[in-house]
Image (cartoon, rainbow, N blue to C red):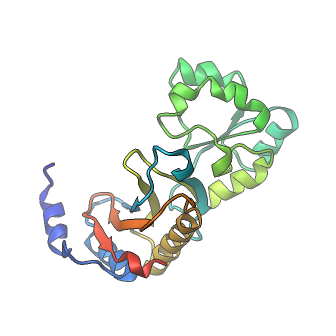
Amino acid sequence: MKHGKKYAEAAKAVERTRLYDPEEAISLVKKIASAKFDETVEAHIRTGCDGRHADQQIRGAVVLPNGTGKKVRVLVFAKGAKADEALAAGADYVGAEELVPKIQKDGWLDFDVVVATPDMMGVVGRLGRVLGPKGLMPNPKSGTVTMDVTKAIADIKAGKVEYRLDKTNIIHCLVGKTSFTEEQLMENFNALISAINKARPAAVKGQYLKSVSVSSTMGPGVKINTLKLD
């Protein structure tokens, strides 16, 4: 993959073989971010899990103490009193069966997170082929299938992010924006690492966090010393 001049300049500031302390890595990512927009800062965590085994899967969510820096649009599938509750709690969109053709046929996807009450999962299940590949299917493990729609919406709007293993056993998750202070990014990063450490499957033997790096949207990755992440 070919990178531009700005990336090449930024990459010169990163020692490829060095494992940085978390604070140093975050500071460096902020310093070398050069895009004209407010870049997202992401953590990339390679685990010792084998996601082919159900007992080594990782999926969960954590509320980042300083939010994500993004405005999150929430769609809630609910009926009756729960639909009213969702609207009162600040959901951007609320509906039921009538939303299925709008999403399936019209390709409407103007939302970032989907929440559903358990009784609506039969309806939402029909959208699995559309929502699943985009990571938008509600899931009890991430707190998006729940009767407590008020709490779910409040957490999401406050900065709740989902994390899960991809096919290569890596977790990719945002921890904020380059406009955040180093302290804000560190607090968010620590909250994410703490949640992932707690989610360690009992079946995983040996080293759990194999490698961790942070990067901005357009910048190079900065490797972190995993021994500093206990």
Q: Can residue 182 be seen by looking at this rendering?
A: yes
Residue 152, x across and y down, in percent? 71, 52
Image-based side of 167 in relation to 5, left or right: right
The residue at the point 27 percent across, 61 percent down is 35
Is 213 located above or below residue 103 in the figure? below
Compared with residue 79, is residue 20 higher up or lower down, i.e. above or below?
A: below
Residue 145 at x, y percent in the picture: 71, 43
Residue 159 seen anywhere in this rendered image of the structure: no
Can you say whether 37 is above or below 101 in the image?
below
Q: Nearer the viewer, residue 56 or 228?
A: 56
Q: Residue 221 versus residue 72: which sits nearer the camera?
A: 221
Residue 146 in the image, given as x and y percentages of width and height: 75, 45
Residue 102, image quadrant: top right
Task: Name the one closer to the observer, 197 or 38.
Answer: 197
Task: Measuring from the top left, give residue 210's x and y in whole percent.
Answer: 37, 66
Does residue 170 lie above or below 13 as drawn?
above
Give the total number of marks visible in the rendering.
Answer: 0
* Residue 139 left/right relative to 215: right
Residue displayed at 19% across by 69% down: 10
Along the horizontal axis of the image, is 97 left or right of 167? right
Along the viewing direction, whichever of 87 and 146 lies nearer the viewer: 146
Furthest-right residue in this view: 81
